[in-house]
Image (cartoon, helix red, strand yellow):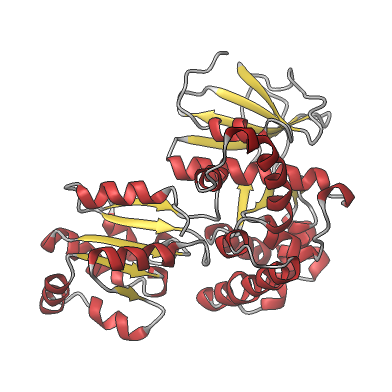
Amino acid sequence: MYKRAIEDKIEEYLKGNDYKTFYIWGPRRSGKTTLLKELSKKLGVRVFNFDFSSDHNLFAPDRDILEKLTSQNKVILIDEVQNYPQATIAIKLLYDEFKVKVIATGSSELRQKDKEFDTQVGRFTEHYCLPLSLKEIKANSNLPSYEEKSFEKKLIESLQVFGSYPEVYTTKTLSDQDKIELLENIIQTYVLKDVVDIYGLKNKKLAEDILTKIALQLGSEVSIREIAASLGSNGITVANYIEIFIKNYILIPLPSFKTNIRKSVSENRKLYFYDLGVRNAFVKDFRETKLRPDQGGLFENFIIIEIEKQRRNTGVKRSLYFYREYGGKEVDLVIEDYYKKYQCVEMKVQGQGGNKDIFPLPHVFTTIDQNNYFSTITGIMEDKKKKS
């Protein structure tokens, strides 16, 4: 089993005196269930899976039921908590009345589905288990130093083509065709069917078409109006679908940076995929990157994915944007901390170019290319004082 970044935080929670509910969010098939199964063995308790309605009844807001539950489980483990959002009331009572530790995983954050979730304010912490990050892959590889550069070169190609879902990346016996079939299965059973079912969406084909349109626009601003017109739908419907994909860790939104002293004009967002294997399955292209016309977009999406994983895995407070002027000049990524310090990032496959002087506020400028991507990404979210 791959050791995940979240495991140290879980261990600290179990050893500590904090009884706040420990939520772990992330897409299905990203390793959350595996984590709970390992914890179940270690702690000698069962996993309550809210995919099963029979487990719902065990979390009624009833003192007798909850007393029995806590007497039999020193730690309560819940999988797919989003499938029974009404359990929020019982989970709140487990904190208020019983002081029992609860670790709950979900592929869709409860605050988006359950009006009662807000009553848990101050009673929970949030963490993430996403597709494998660069740091997690490296930590589990046990490489001698002289093999690191060769490893990193092969890794970037693999992750841009097949992504980093644990099943896809860690199962070494899979052929390329096996990986493609597995990714198509993930799309049909989770990305489309599961999300459509959970949210009661009326049109699975529309969901697939919207994601395909976005997949073809990597690195470009996405116009909801244009997507809606091209699919014969309306903007509100398309916008709602996109927000659901964002909330379910399928898409990463990157808004335009706004400030009163600049010439930025964009009102649209850019949208990237959390996993490029999934993205490539939508466009049905698994060729090596050097043969592809979307090579630049793939590299840009790859960098955004890994920086977003770093942001969520470390819990460092940063906001991510892109920046564009009226004349069309653009900064691929602007990272803003809570002290209004800025880092501008250009992503260049070959490490050429860079619009250093476009961003109007004091900033540090970084170029990420295929040669320096690993060290730059894994260090970019560190809390360190930046020069301006």
Q: Nearer the viewer, residue 186 or 140?
A: 140
Q: Quadrant of residue 192?
A: bottom right
Residue 154 location, x and y as percent?
Answer: 71, 46
Percent position (x, y) of residue 51?
41, 79
Please give left or right for residue 132 compared with residue 273 in the image: left
In depth, the one of 366 and 84 nearer the eye is: 366
Q: Is residue 254 visible?
A: no
Q: Residue at x 74, y 21 (%)?
A: 358
Is residue 346 depicted above or below 97 in this figure? above
Q: Quadrant of residue 45?
A: bottom left
**Residue ID at (41%, 69%):** 82
Residue 16 seen from this side: yes
Q: Nearer the viewer, residue 39 or 204?
A: 39
In this image, 301 relative to 144: left or right?
A: right
Q: Position of residue 331 (x, y in %)?
A: 72, 30
Q: Is residue 193 left or right of residue 262?
A: left
Q: Residue at point 84% right, 28% down? A: 327
Please say if 163 is above or below 264.
below
Which residue is at the far bottom? 54
